[in-house]
Amino acid sequence: MKQVQFVVEAKKYFEVDAERLEQAKETDMVLVTIDFENRKADYIWYGAGENPANFPSESDDFDGVVALWEDLGRPGE
C-alpha cells in the first residue's frame, strides 16, 4: 500500500486544532490523502455539496494523520 485516500467530517479531523475546529461547520468534510512511500499527508477541507477539487490541498503532520486513520478503522484501505 503506497497511498490511501478517505473522507472524514471536518469536526473530527480538526478536533486537535482548536482554531480550525471553531471555523468548521457541522457539514464540512475533509478529503485526506496519506502517501506512505514519501511519508506525506495532505488534506482538502470543503463544504457540503462542494467539489473538493475546487479547493487547495494543505500538508499536515504525517504521524498525526496516520494515527487518526488508524483510529477510524483504516478507511480506504
Image (tube, rainbow, N blue to C red):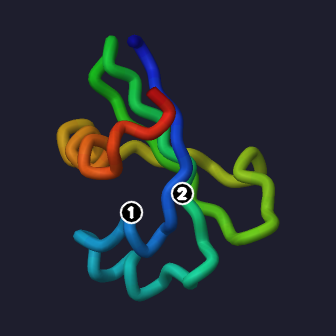
Give the residue drawn at x 50%, y 80%: 24
Residue 60 x %, y %: 33, 46
Amino acid at pointer 2: Val
Q: Nearer the viewer, residue 64 or 60?
A: 64
**In the drawing, does residue 19 fall left or right of residue 6?**
left
Measured along the vertical axis of the image, is residue 55 above or below residue 28?
Answer: above
Q: Which residue is mark 1?
A: 13
**In the drawing, does residue 55 fall left or right of residue 54?**
left
Give the residue drawn at x 50%, y 33%: 76
Give the residue drawn at x 40%, y 31%: 34
Q: Which residue is mark 2?
A: 30
**In the drawing, does residue 67 fall left or right of residue 10?**
left
- Quadrant for residue 22, please give it: bottom left
- Quadrant for residue 59, please give it: top left
- Mark 1, Cα crowd under 10 Å, few <14 / some 14-19 / many 20+, is many
Q: Are marks 1 and 2 in contact (CB under 8 Å)?
A: yes
Amino acid at pointer 1: Tyr
Quarter occupied by the N terminus: top left
Give the residue drawn at x 21%, y 45%: 67
Furthest residue in direction bottom, as rendered? 22
Quarter occupied by the C terminus: top left
Measured along the vertical axis of the image, is residue 35 above or below residue 58?
Answer: above
Disc assigned to residue 44: none
Residue 18 x %, y %: 28, 81
- Quadrant for residue 26, please give it: bottom right
Furthest residue in direction front, as rendered? 73
